[in-house]
Image (cartoon, grey):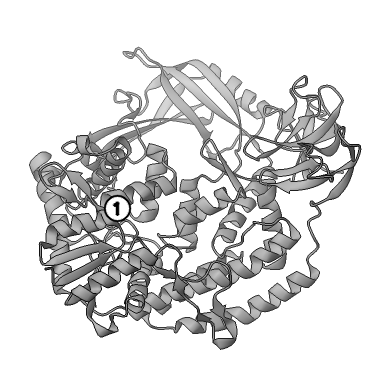
Amino acid sequence: MPKNLVIVESPAKAKTIKKFLGSSYEVIASNGHVRDLPKSTLGIDIENDFEPKYITIRGKGEVLAKLRKEVKKADKVYLATDPDREGEAISWHLYNTLKLEHKDSRRITFNEITKNAVKTSIKQARDIDMNLVDAQQARRVLDRIVGYQISPLLWAKIKRGLSAGRVQSVALRIICDREEEINSFIPEEYWSIEAFLHQEGLKKPLEAKFTGTTKGKLEIHSREEAENIKQAVEQAEFVVTEIKKSERTRKPPLPFTTSTLQQDAARKLNFATQKTMRLAQQLYEGIEIKGRGSIGLITYLRTDSVRISEEADQNAREYIEKQYGSQYLLKTEGKKTGNNNKIQDAHEAIRPTDMTLSPVKIKEMLSRDQFRLYQLIWNRFLASRMEFARYETMTAKMEAADYCFQASATKMIFDGFMAVYNPDNEKEDKGQNIKNLEKGTSLIPEKVDAKQHFTQPPAHYTEALLVKTLEELGIGRPSTYAPTITTIIARRYVVKENKNLYVTELGEAVNYMMKKGFPSIVDVNFTANMEFLLDKVEEGAVKWKSVIRNFYPDFKEALDIAQRELEEVKIDDEVTDVICEQCGRNMVIKYGPYGKFLACPGFPDCRNTKPHYELAGVPCPICGEDVVLKKTKKGRKYYGCVNNPECEFMSWQKPSTKKCPECGSYLVEKGKKLACSNDSCGFVCDIS
């Protein structure tokens, strides 16, 4: 009979670990949390110093009965939940629920599920780290107070079923702020000039780009300026004034953290953050490998450290030397730069656990998506131990009619880490052949092109960009990025179209309410500082209830004021002049999952509904009928003609009744300005 019991979180993890420990160990899964705050009530005794009231999670009775039975049979119990705050909290809840104070019980952690790591953890068993538990309790209590006390206010003011959250509300604000920035962005015109020069001995003309005058750099902002320069150099002789040769290097990437893995998987594999984490969890917990059983293929997936163990580093270097040669070995290890005080160095970076299990070797044992993610992790880790890529660059500066141009070329002379991992899918060689050029060489222009451009607004947030921004601002932690994004999409505050995240009408209403009633909750700096305090709790420098005590009075005051003073967003039961054709009543505006719609107030006797279109107050620039505010299928707002589909007019910005004095196109509102809807025009004026 097994004398030792190991409790883990998932059955897949249990299966993998059981294989390593042998017959004297029984390994059983708790299937995640067994105890939590109740769903139906706040679950925090605010009058009793914010004491949380934990209860057994519904449906966990059978699991706990099985665990208690196994605990009774065992001489020693090991709690082997994940090696982070949440994992520590789960172990603590198991300790209390199973009454392990009367048992010989210990806590074990491992960064990878391998035989060596698991056996070493048994030798290094310890007590539960209450600092980690308290950091998790502080986060849970803070999130519960914010969510459960603000959400009913949103129900009363906007619509039932909405939710607010300490981190999700900040993420929503970040996206809303970017949308406002994009909508009010005024493009600025600029021009580029390229000269295609005849060079003897070459089939293709040499391409040189305008950089300025002999007196310095010059930016071109109008067609007239561009045409003047073009005419001046079209018949002029181009003379090379300087040839510059140099070598540049590109350093290898750091191994993956949770954030950079989510960003790269989104960019290269088109994976949503939630999908990336689900697949990474499978790779971490164990995959059935032919002839070797279930093996954890990667290290722990929730980390913001780029540290690598000496053993892993050595194994990677041996692999590189054998497969690629010693010239590919990194001589000096790159160091992480930036705001290191945000990094929790409890874990290693995300890496493969066994260098002999290359992606190609185990491809048949993985699903397509598991293979693609594993290959990405494998290649990135290998690249992080490899030498810099080296490039030879050559630049030729030339003059024509007192104007300066430049031609450049780049050639890779050593691929280094690029042999396995190309961060931006960039081409090895850029530019053209300019080796024959010398100082004083004369060139004749075959063609000179002047091109008009406009500055572009900031990019819409994608999941990858939002994760990067949250990390840079110190908001959330590796375990929270994916759930935060998933929540704001699931609540329909944000929609995802072609990778981009757009705010819905519902999201705008919630963000407005949060900014007006709870400015500190959606303040980026406040939220980042709260994460800093949670880190201090983990370090043992701050007591977790002190964080809550300091937070709550100001929050309660804001909550009371918001309940008294916030004006309601008038969307429920707003009576319109639209008559229900089925029963003759005036239809009212309701708010559903997709935004506003018209419904008959006679429900349930009359169930008639129809789309609600808000008049924009301007005529259609094409047919003269009303322009109304519409939404795409996913909820993104736009302006369209009421006569659609007969009239195809649509605009992301609100159209104006004024016409462009330069080209005759309609103008659109952009913040406090009016801008021409014709992208190639560029006319801008103040809203009068």
In what element is the residue under mark 1?
Answer: loop
What is the three-letter code of the residue carrying label 1? Leu
Confirm whether residue 678 shows in the render.
yes
Q: Is residue 548 above or below residue 449?
A: below
Image position of 70 (left or right of 608)? left
Which residue is label 1 attached to? 254
Image quarter (top left, top right, bottom left or bottom right) of the C terminus: top right
Picture quarter containing residue 28? bottom left
Report the number of numbered marks. Answer: 1
Q: Residue at x 53, y 73 (%)?
A: 142
Q: Position of residue 406 (x, y in %)?
A: 44, 31
| Of 195 and 58, the residue lying toward us | 58
Q: Is residue 143 above or below residue 413?
A: below
Image position of 385 (left or right of 279)? left
| Of 443 and 348, the residue lying toward us | 348
Picture quarter containing residue 393? top left
| Of 543 and 53, the residue lying toward us | 53
Disc 1 crowd rating (10 Å Cα; few below 14, some 14-19, many 20+) is many
Image quarter (top left, top right, bottom left or bottom right) of the N terminus: bottom left
Query: Residue placed farthest to the left in the image?
Result: 322
Image position of 26 (left or right of 274)? left
Q: Position of residue 288 (x, y in %)?
A: 19, 45
| Of 75 and 518, the residue lying toward us | 75
Q: Position of residue 38 (x, y in %)?
A: 52, 70
Confirm whether residue 532 shows in the render.
no
Picture quarter containing residue 539? bottom left
Q: Is residue 220 above or below residue 151?
A: above
Q: Is residue 368 above or below residue 67?
A: above
Q: Position of residue 254 (x, y in %)?
A: 29, 53
